[in-house]
Image (cartoon, rainbow, N blue to C red):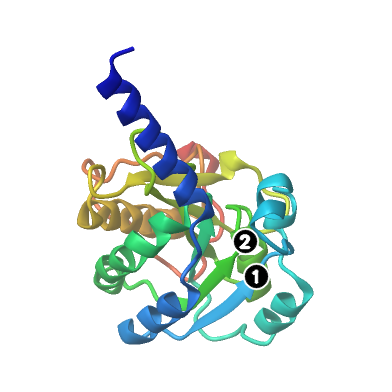
Amino acid sequence: MPTQALLEFMLDHARARDAVHSPFDVPAMMRGFSDIGLAASEVASRVHDRTEYLRRPDLGRMLDPASQHLLAGRGGGSRQLAIVVGDGLSPAAVNAHALAVVRSLIPRLAADGVDIGHAVVASGARVALGDEIGAILGVRMTVMLIGERPGLSASDSLGAYLTFAPEVGLTDEKRNCVSNIHGSGLGYDEAAFRIAWLIREGLARGLSGVALKDESGAQAPRAITANSTRHDESET
């Protein structure tokens, strides 16, 4: 292998490792939500440190008791949507991109008449942690912005996972994903456009996952109604 190629590989590998172990800047995330005009709740999974997070994915899918109690007292109000920001496997990606995506997303949701009932910042989070958060808050849909597994081509890639009717025990076919959000990948505005489309359509049809295809450039929007809770089987 040529020296230059070897050095580039070693650098990319080091960046990926650093991204996994970078600290999650929760105070900055909380301030960012406040500046946007959203009051966020700070929660944590049951992992105690980053080593346990990597070794015990199951603990990253469950809220610790204090967080469960906190969110139980935060229910009520708008129950349409909760935005959850979690560190995931690349806190560096979340620190760099999550707030910018949220800033671009908010006016699109407002134009669609979607109320953000809750915002949550979650440490030690896996994707499925959003299911328990959404279930406790009683929202119809959650969108989880989380750091994706770093690769050699991108160590700071952010993903957005959308789940209608969140509850503990759901599996991945119940989610939609908008991935590869970073400086050399999907831009903030395009990501926000796709996420907003999936949120609007998911709420209107009462579903998410494999039954909801991203056709954001092909269809007129559906009206969101308060009693849209489950999809018509004829649509699938």
Left or right position of 234 against 65:
left
Q: Which residue is mark 1?
A: 44
Q: Quadrant of residue 213?
A: top left
Residue shown at 39%/80% (left/top)? 33
Q: What element does badge 1 sit on?
A: strand
Report x, y in % for residue 28: 41, 77
Report x, y in % for residue 196: 32, 59
Q: What element does badge 2 sit on?
A: loop
Name above or below for residue 96 compared with residue 182.
below
Q: Is residue 37 visible?
A: yes
Q: Nearer the viewer, residue 113 or 10?
A: 10
Q: Are marks 2 and 1 in contact (CB under 8 Å)?
A: yes
For the N terminus, which image quadrant?
A: top left
Residue shown at 59%/41% (left/top)? 172
Left or right position of 105 against 225:
left
Name above or below for residue 208 compared with residue 33.
above
Q: Quadrant of residue 102?
A: bottom left
Name above or below for residue 31 compared with residue 138.
below
Name above or below for residue 70 compared with residue 184.
below
Q: Amino acid at mark 1?
A: Ala
Q: Which residue is mark 2?
A: 124
> For the residue carrying disc 2, how many other residues have a C-alpha within 10 Å: few (<14), some (14-19), or many (20+)?
many
Report x, y in % for residue 143: 47, 60
Which dot marks residue 228? none
> For the residue carrying disc 1, how many other residues have a C-alpha within 10 Å: few (<14), some (14-19), or many (20+)?
many
Left or right position of 153 against 43:
left
Report x, y in % for residue 210: 50, 37
Q: Is residue 228 visible?
A: no
Q: Amino acid at mark 2?
A: Gly
- First in residue order: circle 2 vs circle 1: 1
